């Protein structure tokens, strides 16, 4: 019996596009975080929701960028938390911005949400590909 074809988002050639998108998103989040007056279209109306949404998208795209290596998930979590901490550290020195621990907590919640959102997409892969050999 022939294996079902991979969905386009899991095809090995798509990984480079997911990585490019991740890089662009990281730059966009940094620009929004460091800009003295981000555009109102990028604001949900609640700062913590802005953080959670941004980091949910970053985490989901990062999962697709490193697939099929679920063992690297910790890199996604640690890397994005470090990125969030860097943003807060820089913001604490930028007027009129401020760094807040609650923002980092919202980033962490967003990372968890992003990982959960990516899970069904990754489950579409055949079991043999979801558990790569070392």
Image: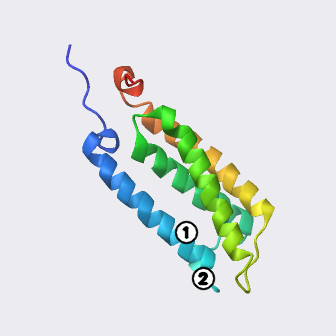
Q: How is the image coloured?
A: rainbow
Q: Residue furthest left?
A: 2
**Count of numbered circles on the image:** 2
**Local crowd size for mark 1, using a 10 Å CA cut-off: few (<14), some (14–19), many (≥20):** some
Residue at 76% across, 71% down: 99
Q: Position of residue 39 (x, y in %)?
A: 58, 82
Q: Position of residue 27 (x, y in %)?
A: 48, 70
* Quadrant of image for the N terminus: top left
Q: Residue furthest top?
A: 1
Q: Is residue 114 visible?
A: no
Which residue has dot 2 on it? 35
- Residue 29 tag number: 1
Q: Secondary structure at mark 1?
A: helix
Q: Vertically, is 23 above or below 2?
A: below
Q: Secondary structure at mark 2?
A: loop
Quarter-wise, where is residue 40 in the image? bottom right
Q: Position of residue 45 (x, y in %)?
A: 71, 72
Separation (CA) of disc 2 from disc 1: 10 Å
Residue at 50% across, 42% down: 118
* Quadrant of image for the C terminus: top left
Closer to the camera in the image, 89 or 67: 89
Q: Vertically, is 31 above or below 101?
A: below
Q: Vertically, is 115 above or below 25?
A: above
Closer to the camera in the image, 6 or 130: 130
Q: Position of residue 8 (x, y in %)?
A: 29, 43
- Residue 65 tag number: none
- Pick whichever of labels 2 and 1 is earlier in the sequence: 1
Residue at 35% across, 20% down: 128
Quarter-wise, where is residue 122 in the image? top left
Q: Is residue 17 visible?
A: yes
Residue at 46% across, 51% down: 61
């Amino acid at each position: 019996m022939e294996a079902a074809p991979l969905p386009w988002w899991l095809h090995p050639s798509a990984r480079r596009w997911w990585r490019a998108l991740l890089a662009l998103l990281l730059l966009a989040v940094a620009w929004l975080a460091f800009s003295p007056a981000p555009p109102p279209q990028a604001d949900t109306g609640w700062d913590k929701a802005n953080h959670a949404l941004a980091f949910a998208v970053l985490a989901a795209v990062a999962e697709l960028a490193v697939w099929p290596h679920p063992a690297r998930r910790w890199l996604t979590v640690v890397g994005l938390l470090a990125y969030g901490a860097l943003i807060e550290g820089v913001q604490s020195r930028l007027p009129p911005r401020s760094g807040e621990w609650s923002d980092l907590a919202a980033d962490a919640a967003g990372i968890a949400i992003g990982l959960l959102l990516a899970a069904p997409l990754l489950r579409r892969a055949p079991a043999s590909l979801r558990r790569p050999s070392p």
